[in-house]
Image (spheres, helix red, strand yellow):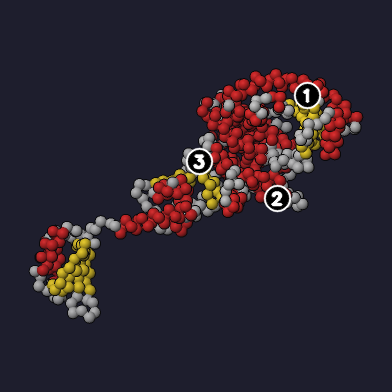
Amino acid sequence: MTVPETAKKYPQGLVGRAYRFSENAHKGQKRKTEEPYFNHALAAAETLLEWKLDEATVAAGLLHDTVEDTGVSLEAIRKEFGDEVAFLVDGVTKLGKIKYRGQEARAENLRKMVLAISQDLRVIFVKLADRLHNMKTLSALPREKQKRVAMETSEIYAPLAYRLGMQTLSGDLEDLAFPFIHPDEYKWLKVQVKEEYEKRNEYLERIKPEVEKILSKEGIKALVIDFRAKHYSSLYKKLLRYNMDFEKIYDLVAFRIILKTVDDCYAALGLIHKLWPPLPGRIKDYIASPKPNRYQSLHTTVIGPEEKIVEFQIRTKEMHQEAELGIAAHWVYQQQKGFRSYFQRMPARVKIEDIEWVRQLRNWLSTRSSLETKPEEFVESMKIDFFKDRIFVITPRGDVLDLPAGSTPVDFAYHIHSEIGDTCVGAKINGTFTPLDEELRSGDVVQIITQKNKKPSKDWLNFAKTAVAKNHIRNALKEKEQILRKRVPTRTEIRLVVKDRIGLLKDVTAAIASSHVSILNLHTSAPSGSEFPTDKIEIATTDKKKIEKLILKLKKIKEIKEISYKII
Ligand code: MN
């Protein structure tokens, strides 16, 4: 059943309501292809349905661009469709803020961020379905944008899909991106491969009856026997490794046999080897040892009739479905939010640690150059994988910063640049003004507001989380103190020891006033053990001539026993 059919059959279901809501919200909007915008939302939802995801996810697919591209608020979505759908739409909206800028070093961070922001794998599924349709319609976009989106797809989303076990999708995304990233190579390859593909297809067609015959003779029922052409992008990568020699690419087109049971798979492998000799070193048992992304299959390469080389892939229906859908294949049974809970709900006998691909995912998430990093850093980077200790926040330009959980705008500012940290006076998180001690969350877009010559304040130390920020704050505070100490003096303190009488103070202040100097402070004390009280007067000048003249005037007052001054 398609999405419109579902919507029609269950008009009051989530999908039905989301269908009408989205159609209405996108009314009048057109895509660059001149199609109604709603078609895009529908295409994404259709893909999610194809992946057999739950109805909240399909609804989120329909609604995924409403918050970003129409006047609809997230609150409206929440009110209409509940927390779950709102959460998914919000996640996809946040992912849309990430911009890949072609810095390969950052691709790692971006991939981590996508996972961290998503929190729920279904957010990634919606994003992947969205991206798949965007890639299919990419030629309508301006050239510059085409390249950026294609690079982002190839660097971020195709690898993510692969890690999630969605091999077919990953290859499709790579293939859709390939012509935009390497246009010349693509043109060349298309011409080269066409003939080769046809030749090999024809050959496989010819030997197919032999395979069918030998299987049925042994009572093995093949559910599907077909041929799978290698993805252009991976073919190209392989050609680069083999000096562009097509003869060496044995799996340009491969035989794919899908059977009922694992026993059938091994039996079929044996039968094929009996028929044609296998190439040594090319038998791969991914059933006994699955690939890190959980891919399972038997692969073998044999020397077929006419001495031609053929690759076979043999697997069960379940293995095939997993190769197509990856982790999404389990989703129907495991509708639980979040990465962790997903694994916690796996059958009791399967521990998280036992799932090979999870381990691989962890390794992959830690820095690529993990072998070169120090052991303590490595341990630290392992922690990132389940994201409880790290957050990923975005600059207004779309760059990603990886910070410890609990970080604030001040940490963010110092991580961009020490000067931005030192001069920051405020922050906007997702467009809203927020205090500098606000805790940041993954996916926040953070903008720092600075003011020239501003200095950090001491209480920042109470909430700054990162050592980088704290050190900079301390340094800046020290500098501030030194500047204060080195401050240009503006005042003079005059110290008078007097024999007090009524009206003396008045005479003193009159003398000062007649010198056109203002009094800032006046303090009288009578130190014990001293016969005479002391007056301390602060005046607002540092002009020595003025002060000397004033001193002369004061000396004329006979009750003044001693006069001294210092510029402060
Ligand atoms: Mn979209």
- Residue located beneath label 2 in the image: 352
CA separation, marks 3 and 2? 32 Å
Labels 2 & 1 near each other (Cβ < 8 A)? no
Which residue does the image show at 51% across and 45% down from the upper left?
401
> Callout 2: helix, strand or loop?
helix
Labels 3 & 1 near each other (Cβ < 8 A)? no
Viewed as shown, does residue 263 lie left or right of 153?
right
Q: Is residue 522 above or below residue 268?
A: below
Task: Work out whether residue 19 or residue 298 is closer to the camera in this orientation and state it.
Answer: 298
Which residue does the image show at 22% across and 81% down from the upper left?
529
Q: Look at discs 3 and 1 and give the one toward the viewer.
A: 1
Q: Residue lying farthest bottom?
A: 529
Labels 3 & 2 near each other (Cβ < 8 A)? no
How far across and down, in percent of the image, does residue 467 sit? 48, 54
Q: Look at discs 2 and 1 and give the one toward the viewer.
A: 1
- Residue located beneath label 1 in the image: 308
Task: Work out whether residue 562 or residue 288 is closer to the camera in this orientation and state it.
Answer: 288
